Image (cartoon, helix red, strand yellow):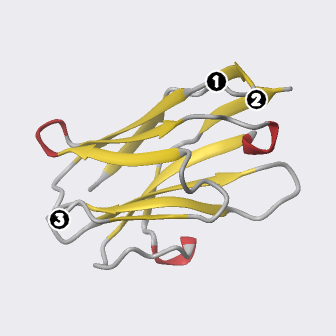
């Protein structure tokens, strides 16, 4: 059974940075994909970024391209989301997720396991 624990959220001013972490437990196969999603109040869950566990290939949502970076540490079974140049519209609960499928999927429906979420608030 895979479990995900995301952390690192907080309150930051616009233009600042945060790094989110997602620690995984259980057996992680190289074919898995890890993703980050976010959800603001009253809005649908939005794709942020994904990374292929083995090859390290990445994909980003349009709204975060050039500002966010997803990475993973295979030895620590941890995925990170470095968020720079944060904007108030980045405010949301951020979730890490794991897909058993290959491919950098952006739909939350293909992700089987989810972290509990971590709040990111960006003040103007």
Residue 74 occupies quadrant = top left
Q: How far is disc 1 from disc 3 in space, using C-alphas?
A: 30 Å
In the drawing, does residue 65 fall left or right of residue 14? left
Q: Nearer the viewer, residue 81 or 112?
A: 81
In the drawing, does residue 70 fall left or right of residue 124? left
| Residue position marked by numbered label 2 in the rendering | 122
Give neighbour class at mark 3: few <14, some 14-19, many 20+ (Cα, 10 Å). Answer: few
Could you say which disc has been placed on residue 24 in the image? none
| Residue position marked by numbered label 3 in the rendering | 55
Q: How far is disc 2 from disc 1 in space, using C-alphas?
A: 8 Å
Could you say which disc has been placed on residue 16 in the image? 1
In the drawing, does residue 19 fall left or right of residue 63? left
Q: Determine the residue positioned at 38% across, 45% down.
A: 4
Quarter containing the N terminus? bottom left
Badge 1 vs badge 3, beta-carbon distance below 8 Å: no
Badge 1 marks a residue whose secondary structure is loop
Residue 23 position within the rendered picture, expressed as x and y whole percent measured from the top left: 32, 38
Q: Say which label, 2 or 1, has the lower sequence index.
A: 1
In the drawing, does residue 107 fall left or right of residue 101? right
Residue 9 position within the rendered picture, expressed as x and y whole percent measured from the top left: 58, 28
């Amino acid at each position: 059974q895979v479990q995900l624990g995301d952390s690192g959220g907080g309150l930051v001013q616009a233009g600042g940075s945060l790094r989110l972490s997602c620690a995984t437990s259980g057996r992680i196969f190289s074919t898995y994909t890890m993703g980050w999603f976010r959800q603001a109040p009253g809005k649908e869950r939005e794709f942020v970024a994904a990374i292929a566990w083995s090859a390290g290939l990445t994909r980003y949502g349009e709204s975060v391209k050039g500002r966010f970076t997803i990475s993973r540490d295979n030895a620590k079974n941890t995925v990170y989301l470095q968020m720079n140049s944060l904007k108030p519209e980045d405010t949301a609960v951020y979730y890490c997720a794991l897909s058993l499928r290959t491919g950098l999927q952006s739909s939350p429906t293909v992700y089987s396991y989810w972290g509990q979420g971590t709040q990111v608030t960006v003040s103007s």
